[in-house]
Image: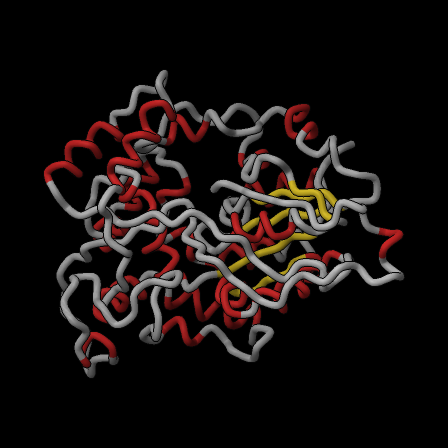
Amino acid sequence: MALPDFLVIGVPKAGTTALHAALARHPRLFMSPVKEPKFFLTDGPPPAKGGPGDAETYREHVWRRADYEALFADAPPGALRGESTPFYLYDRAAQRRIREAIPDAKLIVSLRDPVERAHSNWTHLWSAGLEPIGDVIEACAAEKRRIADGWSPFWHYVGLGRYGEQLEHLFTLFPREQVLVFRYRDLVDRPATTLDRICAFLGVEQGLISEVPRENVTAHPRHSRRHRILARLARLGDPLLGQRLTAPLERVLQRDGQPRRPLTWEQRQELLAYFAADIALLRDLLGRDSFGEDFGDWLRPRERSAAWSARGRPASGRPATAASEAPPTRPAARCGRPAGRRSHRGVEPPIRARPPRPPRDDQRSSVRSSWPPSARVSS
């Protein structure tokens, strides 16, 4: 039975596409050729309707058991099979389906500052022309209505970032030794160390992969009449045309776009209200991370925002001020809407560490001679 041995289960906009590509370079790991098959998200066919663009996404689900198993049919003998669907952690029913089908699976979770994650998620959909609300704070406030209307999980900017609740449920189904949790910033700042940690967790040779590949970077389009018109076309997209319509529109929307800029401290405070209690739960569940921190930094202003974004510039585009960089002495008033930033398809610039080392002499018999294979994953 060709089911995976391990899963990257969370979270969206936390480097899972880059991680999938990096792990595919290891000679003892076989990653599914479809990066997000989403098999465990449903018991049968996915929904046919949802938010803007959801119908097209649902058609990409690999929901038939035979099709899902076929993704792993080419795994070399002895290789561990894996796939990456970062919505599995968020979906409690998906967690239960994984437990029923592969109870011994090892689960990998990359966590990102939940405010940054929400902002990146909103930016992704805005740059694609699918998000109709040009203010991340207002878009988060619309989440309950969108969920009631059946919009897919990628629109759940707040819910996706409540990791404490998600992990608390996961730990009722899987022993903690089967779950590896690390921070997105570890993948950014310490790729070699983080990849070695993942390899040790999976029980394969360390030191064979030490670099996270570049991913596509999508700029944030400006608010303009052209953007409004093209975005309206993207949201109305003809299901029969699919990518033949949406992909060209997306490229035009992002033409002449600007780099995604950080949120101000006032904006960050407003969004933190959604996550503060859950961050406390996460700290109780996990304690300190592998580098001795307890996630309390997520409650403070950011020294840098998003994934390698411009520093020291609030989302309004005005020069940074002391007030926007330091905590205020009283609750912040409602601030102006962010001009917005988009990290479409997972903003991951090149991350370099030491060059990959070839296998040691005592490892050569246990790895494929084609090491290291090339890998490119489009998100």
Residue in the foreground of this view, choosing between 306 and 250:
250
**Does residue 167 appear to the left or right of 299 in the view shown?**
right
Q: Is residue 168 above or below residue 75?
A: below
Residue at the extreme top? 240
Residue in the foreground of this view, choosing between 189 and 291:
189
Q: Is residue 259 above or below residue 311?
A: above
Q: Residue at x 85, y 58 (%)?
A: 363
Q: Residue at x 31, y 30 (%)?
A: 248
Residue 184 visible in rendering: yes
Residue at the extreme bottom? 329
Residue 273 visible in rendering: no
**Does residue 357 appear to the left or right of 119 in the view shown?**
right
Q: Residue at x 35, y 51 (%)?
A: 343
Residue in the foreground of this view, choosing between 252 and 51:
252
Q: Where residue 276 appears, x then y in whole percent?
A: 37, 68
**Does residue 13 appear to the left or right of 241 in the view shown?**
right
Q: Is residue 271 above or below residue 142?
A: below
Q: Where residue 374 appears, x then y in whole percent?
A: 63, 45
Q: Where residue 93 appears, x then y in whole percent?
A: 55, 41
Q: Residue at x 36, y 33 (%)?
A: 150
Q: Where residue 115 appears, x then y in whole percent?
A: 35, 61
